[in-house]
Image (cartoon, rainbow, N blue to C red):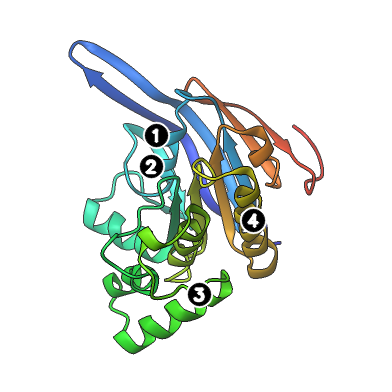
């Protein structure tokens, strides 16, 4: 695995003002993620996970500090620039699946490619290939309401890969799934990491889920407390 940093947070703060009160959701975050790593960001509710994820995923910008994605500081870009970067570089998987109910599975997967200007024939072909990869070749033309929770999450994983992003950012991806289905979804992430070389950032409050990663970064009160190399890692610090 290359040691090039694909994401770097440098003294990142996010402050919200509520009337006369300032709330620091992130307090000087420092984190470096290497290209091809599988990292879990773990912390309890209220620890600042969502704020951290939104900034890493180009969905929000910090109040101060620097966030580097592939060596480019994205901390204070305009929304139009952020949208282009996240569309090309980051694939998202959410707890709530976020599939459009009026679209079939293959149409949901193809949608991110539409926004990147991919020709229709290419969009359909790639969407079908991705759904086959996640084991849904017989459910391609079903709508979300016709799919189980696990199947919907597999559609979401396929959709996250539509533009062949460098980074997969998964925010509590097993939160709405039973334990057996959750295991199968985590196996998909491991496969994407080990067989396809994707950088995986898995956000969770569940230690059993976090342990699937190479490294766990613990977040509490808006700060990273420590980082632990896990079962596939080499050391602790």
Q: Position of residue 86 (x, y in %)?
A: 37, 58
Q: Nearer the viewer, mark 4 or mark 2?
A: 4
Query: Residue 80 or 178: which is nearer the viewer?
Result: 178
The residue pinned by badge 4 equals 184
Q: Which mark is residue 130?
A: 3
How dense is the environment of label 1, judged by Cα within 10 Å: few (below 14), some, or many (20 and up)?
Answer: many
Q: CA distance from mark 4 to mark 3?
A: 16 Å
**Image quarter for residue 119?**
bottom left
Q: Are marks 1 and 2 in contact (CB under 8 Å)?
A: yes
Give the mark nearest the N terminus, 4 or 2.
Answer: 2
Q: Are marks 4 and 1 in contact (CB under 8 Å)?
A: no
Residue at 67% in and 57% down: 187
Left or right: 74, with 5 as reference point: left
Looking at the rendered structure, the secondary structure element under dot 2 is helix
The residue wearing badge 2 is: 54
Disc 1 secondary structure class? helix
* Dots 3, 2 in contact, CB < 8 A: no
């Amino acid at each position: 695995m290359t040691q090039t940093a694909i994401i770097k947070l440098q003294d990142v703060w996010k402050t919200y003002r509520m009337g006369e009160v300032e709330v620091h959701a992130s307090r000087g975050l420092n984190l470096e993620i290497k290209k091809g790593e599988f990292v879990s960001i773990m912390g309890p509710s209220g620890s600042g996970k969502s704020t951290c994820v939104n900034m890493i995923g180009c969905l929000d910008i910090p109040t101060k500090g620097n966030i580097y994605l592939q060596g480019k500081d994205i901390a204070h870009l305009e929304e139009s620039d952020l949208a282009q970067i996240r569309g090309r570089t980051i694939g998202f998987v959410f707890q709530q699946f976020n599939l459009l109910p009026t679209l079939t599975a293959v149409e949901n997967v193809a949608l991110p490619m539409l926004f990147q200007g991919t020709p229709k024939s290419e969009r359909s072909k790639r969407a079908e290939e991705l759904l086959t990869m996640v084991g849904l070749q017989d459910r391609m033309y079903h709508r979300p309401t016709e799919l189980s929770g696990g199947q919907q999450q597999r559609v979401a994983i396929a959709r996250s890969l539509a533009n062949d992003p460098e980074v997969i950012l998964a925010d509590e991806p097993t939160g709405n799934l039973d334990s057996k289905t959750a295991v199968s979804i985590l196996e998909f992430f491991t496969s994407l990491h080990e067989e396809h070389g994707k950088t995986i950032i898995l956000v969770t409050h569940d230690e059993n889920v976090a342990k699937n990663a190479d490294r766990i970064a613990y977040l509490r009160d808006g700060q990273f407390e420590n980082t632990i190399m896990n079962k596939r890692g080499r050391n602790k610090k």
